[in-house]
Image (cartoon, rainbow, N blue to C red):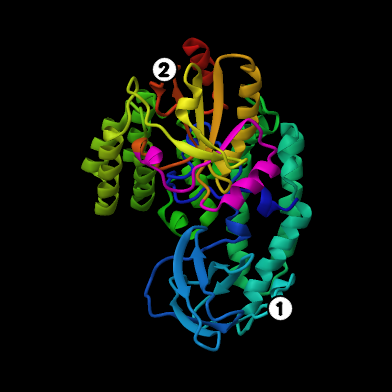
Amino acid sequence: MGITNNLQFIENSKLRETKSFVGTFKIYTFLICSLLATIGTVHSQTKVATISGKIAGKNNSLILVEDGSKVRKIIKPNENAEFRDTLHIKSETYEMYEVKFSKGFNVALRENSDIVLDLTEPTENVKEIISGNDAFISHFYIDKENFFNTHYDGNIYKEKPVVFKNKLKELFANWEKQWKSHSFEPIRKNEEKWSKYAFVQMLVHYPRANQMHRKSFKETKVPADFFEEEKSIDYDNADEFEKVNTYRKLVMSKLLSLLTNPNDTKQVQQLIDKTEKVRSQNIKAAYQEAISDLIDYGNPNNELIYNYIMKNSASEKLRKECEYIFLNTEKSVKKGSKSPSFSFENEKGEKVSLEDFRGKLVYIDVWASWCGPCISEIPYLKKLEADFKGKEVVFVSISKDIKKEHWQQALEKHQLKGIQLWGGNKSDFYDAYFINSIPRFILIDKKGKVISPSAPEPSAPKIKELIEESL
């Protein structure tokens, strides 16, 4: 299996859809940014690149995405299914974008690039799609993806620490031979930095990744010199944070690794204190954004976080978002109150409601097929359900997939049994609990009252204790 299927994107420092990453690192793998390095800094916006071509169907559109999730531009074709548009280039070298069309692919743009895309016929060879004066840069990154798809296997995380690190060194040494031989100097410079930080980030993520591969609650122990390469990393470098994607991911991962429990006031305060010591304003802003995302149902630190952001963030947008989340969280369903009901379809098309389970504890998992952290919890959820088989507790999974067929495909792919319901993307039940991020877990007692509106995830040992106490 290739690297793009194994490495998950931990970007945005916004954890609205990936909040279970915090502390427990539900997404144990890291961004290789679709195997791209967006390296460049913001200067004048007078530099322009052109992208043009022909598309299959005049009603289709191209979506250019940067940094894994930020939509930079939507390009619509004319009546002849042709398109031509320009982008302001911010980088001193070149910028990488993911083109969202069919399976998606990556394209590089720099000042005066004139890239032509032929999207009229499907092809397995992405190089055939991209032509133009700077197509060679995009072709390099296609070769890079092919290299990692061939040489990288996510099962490397199953290895013992020394074996893992040796294999990782071999992987990056082989990749170094590839990029060092390229004639284009900006590619060589970019790849040198990309590789440096990507290597360290894989080291940093290894303990949790290995633990998850072993499906164990026991922490993975590593040798004393395992993180030797990390010692040279400056985690307060504004320039690198602006220019190098893998450095940004590493810096954000390092901050969040300090937090094992967002409900622990001491840990949250330590996070705030660390943020205030950061000299780089762009890193500090990203840290503050990550901290604001810790506001959640039942978190006793919501007010602490809210007050910190409102007083210290220079971003009006972040302050408004934080205030909105905080106020709605405070208004949502609380512990001890009667739970709002739901009525959703099961895989047979039958309606199932919360009242159907009266007399039993109900542990609800709100998830979706596209949610990486949700999928990573499935093995733990299956084990939890097996541990309580025959007891007065039911496990109900509610999918937020917009399309029913995506939910059905996920049921088959992950061999999901038990009570599986499709709730779609909108529901009064979601609104009442203010479910603004998934996965979300809820525990309800035998009489329909809320034990925890934001219960521990299946991988957390505390959930087993909470269920046992509530039976």
* Depicted 76 relative to depicted 63: above or below: below
Q: What stretch is highlighted in magenta?
A: 402-431
Q: In the image as oriented, which residue stretches furthest toward the front?
A: 350
Give me the C-alpha separation between circle 1 and circle 2. 62 Å
Along the line of sight, which residue is nearer the eye, 179 or 302? 302
* Amino acid on which the number 2 mark rests in the picture: Lys
At which x and y percent is residue 55?
59, 80
Residue 113 lies within the magenta run: no
Give x and y (percent) for residue 128: 71, 78
The residue shown at (33%, 35%) is 272
Q: Do the residues bearing badges 1 and 2 touch, measured as CB atoms within 8 Å? A: no
Label 1 SS: helix
The residue depicted at 49 percent of the width and 34 percent of the height is 257
- Residue 193 in view here: yes
Question: 10 Å neighbourhood of mark 2: few (<14), some, or many (≥20)?
Answer: some
Q: Can the viewer see residue 224? A: no
Q: In this view, does 124 lie to the left or right of 404?
A: right
